[in-house]
């Protein structure tokens, strides 16, 4: 329901975790093994000398500092801007409001997702196929959509569950007055395992 690329996010988190794990392992090894500590110190000293030499090779005219420092700040600012743009492109997230109809000077009508959730619960009252439901609204770049989750009773027919979901979606469209994007998820859970199985009659 959102624009968040979950696969990419998980890959980035995995890479960040591996980098942190490797850094922690190297730090721990440097603290426990004298040879690794000496090598770590020598490497750090070498890198610091190289950095000082690079800064000295490109001084700013008429003032202290180096062009490399300016370049580092510029790279940091570009990276920060890209990070902000990437965060802004992620999914808008959950919202309590499903729809809004402006009628000029007469005012506006807002439909909350809670109203739809109550209507769905009443429509499913006494339904032998479903033991629970959940309704939430989510924003994305294309507008606001609805996510409808139905918790199926053990042994319920998938075909009948799909028909029930389709009937609920038609009822939601009629209640709102126009079609809305709906993501339907049919799941099982603790209530499905505890509730009695559905039997053919």
Image: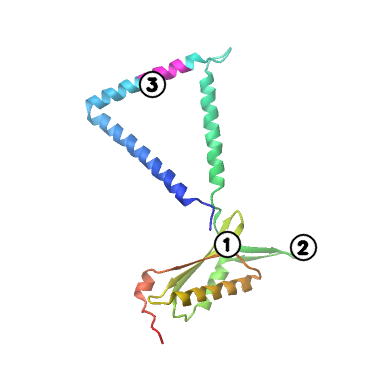
Q: CA distance from mark 2 to mark 3?
A: 68 Å
Place of residue 22 in the rendered image (x, y in percent of width and height, measured from the top left): 33, 36
Asked if 1 appears above or below 47 in the picture, the reply is below
Q: Where is residue 95? Give x, y as percent.
A: 56, 59
The answer to which image quadrant residue 144 occupies is: bottom right
Dot 1 lies on which element? Answer: strand
Quarter of the image with the C terminus is bottom left
Q: Is residue 27 left or right of residue 187?
A: left
Q: Earlier in the sequence, mark 1 or mark 2?
A: 2
Distance between mark 3 and mark 1 Cα atoms: 53 Å
Identify the mark nearer the N-term, 3 or 1: 3
Q: Position of residue 129 (x, y in %)?
A: 44, 78
Circle 3 residue: 47
**Residue at figure coordinates x 49%, y 79% from the top left:** 125
Q: Which residues are magenta?
A: 46-54
- The quadrant in which residue 177 appears is bottom right
Marks 2, 3: nearer the viewer: 3
Q: Is residue 127 magenta?
A: no
**Residue 49 x/y as whole percent:** 39, 17
**Residue at 43%, 71% in the rendered image:** 151
Q: Residue furthest right?
A: 105
Identify whether 86 is placed above or below 74.
below
Per the model, the C-alpha gap separating discs 1 and 2 is 27 Å
Residue named by callout 1 = 145
Considering the numbered disc 3 on the image, is that residue within a helix, a strand or a loop? helix
Position of 111 compared to 54: left or right?
A: right
Helix, strand or loop for disc 2: helix
Sooner in the amino-acid sequence: mark 2 or mark 3: 3
The overriding secondary structure of the stretch rendered in magenta is: helix
Q: Which residue is mark 2?
A: 105
């Amino acid at each position: 329901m959102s624009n968040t690329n979950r696969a990419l996010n998980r890959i980035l988190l995995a890479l960040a975790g591996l980098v942190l794990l490797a850094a922690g392992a190297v730090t721990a090894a440097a603290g426990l093994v004298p040879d690794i500590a000496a090598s770590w110190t020598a490497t750090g000293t070498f890198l610091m000398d190289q950095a000082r030499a690079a800064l000295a090779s490109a001084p700013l005219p008429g003032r202290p500092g180096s062009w490399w420092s300016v370049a580092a700040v510029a790279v940091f600012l570009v990276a920060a801007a890209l990070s902000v743009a990437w965060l802004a492109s992620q999914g808008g997230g959950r919202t309590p409001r499903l729809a809004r109809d402006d009628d000029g000077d007469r005012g506006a009508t807002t439909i909350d997702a809670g109203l739809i959730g109550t209507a769905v619960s009443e429509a499913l009252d006494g339904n032998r196929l479903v033991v629970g439901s959940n309704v939430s609204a989510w924003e994305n770049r294309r507008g606001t959509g609805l996510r409808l989750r139905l918790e199926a009773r053990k042994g319920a027919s998938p075909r009948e569950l799909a028909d029930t979901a389709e009937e609920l979606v038609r009822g939601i469209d009629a209640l709102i007055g126009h079609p809305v994007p709906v993501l339907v998820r049919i799941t099982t859970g603790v209530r499905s395992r505890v509730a009695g199985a559905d039997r053919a009659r």
